[in-house]
Structure formats: structure tokens, C-alpha cells
Amino acid sequence: MVSPAPSYVSYEDFLAAEQRAETKHEWLDGVVYAMVGGTLEHSRIASNLGTALRNALGGCDVFQSDAMTFVRATQLSTYADVAVVCGPVEVQKVERNGGVLGEALINPTILVEVLSDATEEYDRGEKFAHYMRIPSLREYVLVAQDVPRIEVFRRPERGHWQRDVAGPGESITIGGQPIRVDDVYRCAGD
């Protein structure tokens, strides 16, 4: 049996629907995909890393998972767990009938994804391929949910992306500043 082709959804219609949706979705060149929901641990790790980045990167704006990111080159609109913009924030804003339907960051410097069993393959593969097409992106950070491990992929001036990994008791450089892995995995009572 052949599956029917997904129907095309305009970006404007996607944004209008997203304002009313109870769950988040990605939009890829006219096709809408439901995003996997996160766990409390996922949320805690993303929040802790966002706080650590906010404290370490004083001149940068740090956004949580409610901030949409738009990749112009591939027409992907999605939500990273944490997005950082160092410098002026640039957005793609869509308006209809005098009101703002939605806006998305177009110039993130750092994007963070907290990995889960359901998303790890996509976050490491296809999603990273989309993110690599963002000219302003300097670092892509993958944070394990099941063990204390942070990976940072850095865009060099030339050549292939470079990868650093840190685990418990170690620090890793993000945005030019050291971030302690243990701080990212700390529970409120620790």
C-alpha cells in the first residue's frame, strides 16, 4: 500500500496553526511534522544549560525551547532546546491582517539539543545537516540525557566541523567560555 503524499501547508498557515497547537511542530518546506515531547529530566538539563550559558555569555541572548529557529537555506522551521544569539537578534517575522503570526530566529550562534532515544538519530543527522546551513551558527551542542556527556561541534574557518566531548567532573568550552558538565546535570537539591 502506498502512503498518500503529505499535503502542502504554507508557512503562514503553519504559524497560525502553531499558535493554537497544544504540541510543537516542525515545518519543512511545506510539510508539518509533530515533535516528540520531552521528559522532566530533558527540561531540567536544557534549563540548567541555558542558565549556565546565560551566566557565562553576558553579551548574548539565550532563548529556551519556545523560540523558533528558521533555516532559510532548507526552509526548516523548528525549535532547538536552547538557542543563543551573540550580537543583534535577527528574526523572520510573518504578519497577516496587521498582526504577527509568528517569528523565528534566523541568526543563532549556538544551538543546543538534548538527546533522547526518539530524537538522537535525527538530531545528529538530518537536523544537524539543516543547522549547518545557517551561516551564523558557530557551535552545535548535543547533550546526553541518560549519562553526563556534552558534545560540542564547532565550525572552523575552513574544513570539517570539529568535535569536543566532556563528561562528569570536566568542563567544556561553549561560546568561548568553560561550562562545567556537573552543573548542567545538577538537580535542584544538589
Image (cartoon, rainbow, N blue to C red):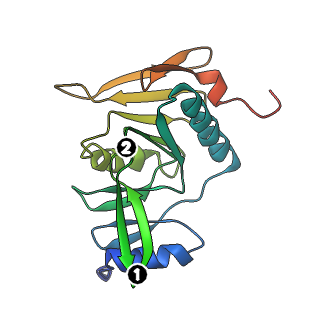
In the figure, is residue 46 to the left or right of 102?
right
Give residue 110's position: percent from left, percent from top: 40, 37
- Residue at image position (48%, 50%) is 119
In the figure, is residue 80 to the left or right of 3?
right
Does residue 43 show up?
A: yes
Disc sitting over residue 98 in the figure: 1
What separation in Å lies between label 2 and label 1 (alpha carbons)? 25 Å
Give residue 47's position: percent from left, percent from top: 63, 41
- The image quadrant that residue 147 belongs to is top right
- Residue at image position (66%, 51%) is 39
Q: Is residue 117 above or below residue 181?
A: below
* Viewer-proximal residue among 137 and 140: 137
Quadrant of the frame with the C terminus: top right
Residue that carries the numbered disc 2 in the rendered image: 88
- The amino acid type, in three-letter code, at marker 2 is Pro
Q: Judge the density around disc 1: few (<14), some (14-19), many (≥20) Cα neighbours within 10 Å.
A: few
Count of marks, rendered view = 2
Q: Residue furthest right?
A: 189
Give residue 144's position: percent from left, percent from top: 54, 35
Q: Judge the density around disc 2: few (<14), some (14-19), many (≥20) Cα neighbours within 10 Å.
A: few
Disc sitting over residue 21 in the figure: none
Q: Are marks 2 and 1 in contact (CB under 8 Å)?
A: no
* Viewer-proximal residue among 55 and 34: 55
- The amino acid type, in three-letter code, at marker 1 is Gly
Give residue 32's position: percent from left, percent from top: 39, 72
- Name the element at disc 1: loop
Q: Residue furthest top?
A: 169
- Residue at image position (63%, 38%) is 45
In the figure, is residue 8 to the left or right of 119?
left
